[in-house]
Amino acid sequence: MTDIGSRAPTTDSHGTAPPSTAWRGWLFFAAFIMLLNGVTWGLQGLMALVNDDYFHVTASGLVLNVDYTVWGFVHLVLGVAFFLSGIGVLTGNRAARGVGVVLAGVNALVAMVFLVAAPGWGIIVIVTDIVVIYALTIHGDEMRNAI
């Protein structure tokens, strides 16, 4: 049976790293989801910057009265941050893990806000973000130990 339970120590009594568990695969999944979200947010930001008419709702019809140019820049910056954080998770960077946890939390909150508009997709995004947050917070050191 594969041990995917509690955190393992960073080294054993002989100074060698413990063997990686199945959570290393989940960390690769989390990093892939972060890269995918970064690209998606970046593309949404570019669409908002390039073409104000791309989205069906006018800026005055949004919950927050924000110009699509501001919305586009925010999504572009957050998308780049999410993408770079995903790359950092693949290298075992702790700061990238922290940024990834925060951005996955933001992504889950945004999905909750739009849950009425797209309930199926919103639930998938929320569950995926919860898995990403769990993998990064509890088992994130396994990626760092594997390098």
Image (tube, rainbow, N blue to C red):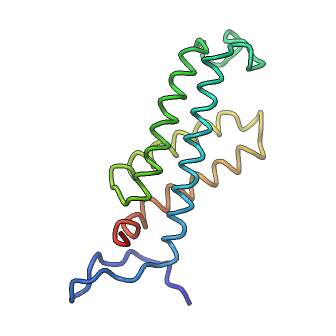
The foreground one among 111 and 67 is: 67
Relative image position of residue 59 (x, y in whole percent): 67, 12
Quarter of the image containing the C terminus? bottom left
Relative image position of residue 31 (x, y in whole percent): 51, 55
Q: Residue at x 58, y 52 (%)?
A: 33
Q: Residue at x 54, y 57 (%)?
A: 30
- Seen from this angle, which residue lies furthest top? 60
Relative image position of residue 25 (x, y in whole percent): 54, 70
Q: Residue at x 54, y 49 (%)?
A: 34
Q: How many marks?
A: 0
The foreground one among 129 and 82 is: 82
The foreground one among 82 and 136 is: 82
Is residue 132 shown left or right of residue 6?
right
Relative image position of residue 108 (x, y in whole percent): 59, 43
Q: Residue at x 59, y 43 (%)?
A: 37
Is residue 141 shown left or right of residue 80?
left
Quarter of the image containing the N terminus? bottom right
Is residue 42 shown left or right of residue 17?
right
Residue 85 vertical placement versus 58 (above, below): below
Residue 126 vertical placement versus 21 (above, below): above
Residue 1 vertical placement versus 93 (above, below): below
- Seen from this angle, which residue lies furthest left? 14
